[in-house]
Amino acid sequence: MRVIMLAPPGAGKGTQGERISARYQVPHISSGEILREETARQTPLGKQLSGYLDRGDLVPDDLVLSIIKDRVIAAAREDGGYVLDGFPRTLEQAEAAAEIGREAHTSAQAVVYLDAPADVLIGRLMGRGENRADDSEAVARHRLEVYTDHTQPLVDYYAARGILVKIDAASPVDVVSQEIFSALDRLKD
Ligand code: ADP
């Protein structure tokens, strides 16, 4: 099972990514988590990343790729697939991911697109109480804008490739999971 998750902040990408990972026994690769870990370790690379994360800006594509690429290839080859959560996030990253997929024969089979209205998203981000540094209202709103400008275009990109699965993420979390599972189960037949 090789899945990309595409979703605005607050749509439940992390939660659903974990559940997909558990059900289909493939690694959950969260670019945001990997970047936050790197920052927490205060490595030279981590220090370079922290400004972007704190502001809610995208980390430059080349940096993200250098951190994510080998993990995706290894997961596809050694662990039977992947759930990518937060990557790709720009058209450039999507093209790079497609190129990696062609080289390594590990292209995604489906892109799960979680969609929800902006007020629902902001409400969830404010209510989740994880105390993530980038969850203040101003930064969360900025992350939504960045999503609209840079990531939303991937919806059309993947729809044109015929692999987009659109799910209403305003539904309760278990309903969302069931809809995702039934779409992905159909892929296996
Ligand atoms: P959310 O979807 O709620 O914004 P993530 O954990 O996916 O949360 O991402 C948090 C932050 O990590 C982003 O605001 C951005 O700074 C950085 N980031 C994560 N993935 C990428 C990526 N693929 N490209 C650039 N920046 C990224």
Image (cartoon, rainbow, N blue to C red):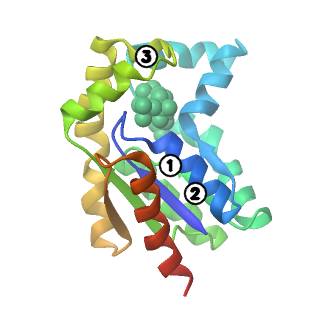
Q: Which residue is mark 2?
A: 20
N-term-proximal mark, 1 vs 3 = 1
Look at label 3 and name its amino acid. Asp
Q: Which residue is mark 1?
A: 16
Image quarter of the C terminus: bottom right
SS at badge 2? helix
Q: Which residue is located at x 43 percent, y 41 percent?
A: 12
Locate residue 102, reporting x and y percent. Answer: 56, 71
Q: CA distance from mark 1 to mark 2?
A: 6 Å
Locate residue 8, reporting x and y percent. Answer: 33, 40
Q: CA distance from mark 1 to mark 3?
A: 20 Å
Q: Which residue is mark 3?
A: 134
Look at label 2 and name its amino acid. Ile
Q: Which residue is located at x 40 percent, y 64 percent?
A: 179
Q: Which residue is located at x 40 percent, y 17 percent?
A: 135
Look at label 1 and name its amino acid. Gln
Q: Is residue 60 visible?
A: no
SS at badge 3? helix
Marks 1 and 2 in Cβ contact (< 8 Å): yes
**Of labels 1 and 3, the one closer to you:** 1
Marks 2 and 3 in Cβ contact (< 8 Å): no
